[in-house]
Amino acid sequence: MADKGRIKKELTELSRDTKSGVTVEVKSEDMHELEGTISGPEGTPYEGGTYVITISIPRGYPFEPPKMKFLTKIWHPNISSQTGAICLDILKDQWSPALTIKTALLSLQALLCSPEPEDPQDAQVATMYKQDPAKFRQTAKFWTETYAQKSDGESAAISRLVEMGFSRDRAVAALAQAGGDETEAVNKLLSS
Amino acid sequence: MSLKVTIKRWNAVARWTWGDHVDGDVCGICQMPFEGCPPGVKFPGDGAPVVWGKCAHAFHLQCISQWLTSKNSCPICRREWEFESSQGGPPVSFFLLFQPTTHSFR
Ligand SMILES: [Zn+2]
Ligand SMILES: [Zn+2]
């Protein structure tokens, strides 16, 4: 059975912490399902975004790592753009029981600052990161604006594509794929 | 110039503790104070002994033993775990607080 005393203690400390930019909310009565948020670090394409992470505490916690996944879509070499699965050593074989939910979330924030394309989770993103850094930044930034920011109205590009007769979902997906490039998105929509 | 400190008075303070290099006084695994109990243990002290590694990191015996079944490393510094065999000193240490009340320069 997971160590409830420790989880409780961690949650109390997290609720007092207003400085580190991470929050955790309890989602199930047994405290095994949690939801964390981290803010996109300044100076990265993720700046201004808020990322929701689902956290599942295994029975063996803290001897086994918490299971974490991005719920908010993100364009990053070490995070799947499809499923939100994370490739980070401390959430796998480098876990230590001296680490906590908070330190794990802070490590995710650090991962947003320094991607590790040599150990990718999403091959397509990693390839773009290495071969076309400018396009990578543009796409990551567009994904931040599209998926990780509180929507105060849609972007003008989405509205224009919807006016052209494409469904909103397809328009968003095409723009995301094209890194926000409207012409490329239209071409994608017309050719598919 | 030399500094001469004259100790006029000192207070001895005794404190129950497992030793004198316990990091932060909480176990790095269960995060409970060493004077308290790890999960599943009702009474502090004999039921929840504290052990040290050669790296000088300390944990409840129960806590580190459980971790060592999956990995032979210190949870804090990740060095290979080796029990410190000479767990120096009795579990009670005395901290002597010297309080110099006057000093003179010469
Ligand atoms: Zn412990
Ligand atoms: Zn150590």
Image: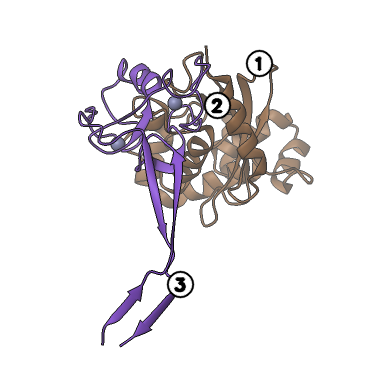
Measuring 64% from the left and 35% from the top, which residue is drawn there? A12
Judging depth in this view, the residue of B4 and B55 nearest the camera is B4
Q: Which chain is purple?
A: B
Mark nearer the N terminus (1 vs 2): 2
Task: Indicate left or right for A50 with A111 as reference.
Answer: right
Q: Chain of mark 3?
A: B
Task: Indicate left or right for A105 with A28 as reference.
Answer: left
Q: Name which residue type carries label 1.
A: Asp
Task: Indicate left or right for A147 with B47 as reference.
Answer: right
Task: Answer few, some or many: residues within 10 Å of disc 1's Cα (few below 14, many 20 plus, some between 14 and 19).
Answer: few
Q: Name which residue type carries label 3.
A: Thr
Measuring 65% from the left and 48% from the top, which residue is drawn there? A18
Task: Indicate left or right for B103 with A81 as reference.
Answer: left
Judging depth in this view, the residue of A192 and A96 nearest the camera is A96
Are labels 3 and 1 assigned to the same chain?
no
**How many numbered callouts?**
3
Q: Which chain is brown?
A: A
- Disc 1 versus disc 2: distance between alpha carbons? 13 Å
Quadrant of the image containing the N terminus of chain B: bottom left
Q: Chain of mark 2?
A: A
From the image, state whether disc 3 or disc 2 is nearer to you: 3
Indicate the position of residue B81 as horizontal and vertical percent values.
24, 28
Image quadrant assignment for residue A124: top left
Q: Does the beta carbon of the residue at mark 3 sit less than 8 Å from ligand 2?
A: no
Q: For mark 3, what is the residue? A: B101
Indicate the position of residue A102 as horizontal and vertical percent values.
53, 37
- Disc 3 versus disc 1: distance between alpha carbons? 56 Å
| Residue B72 in the image: above or below residue A188 | above
Measuring 61% from the left and 39% from the top, which residue is drawn there? A13
Indicate the position of residue B16 as horizontal and vertical percent values.
45, 37
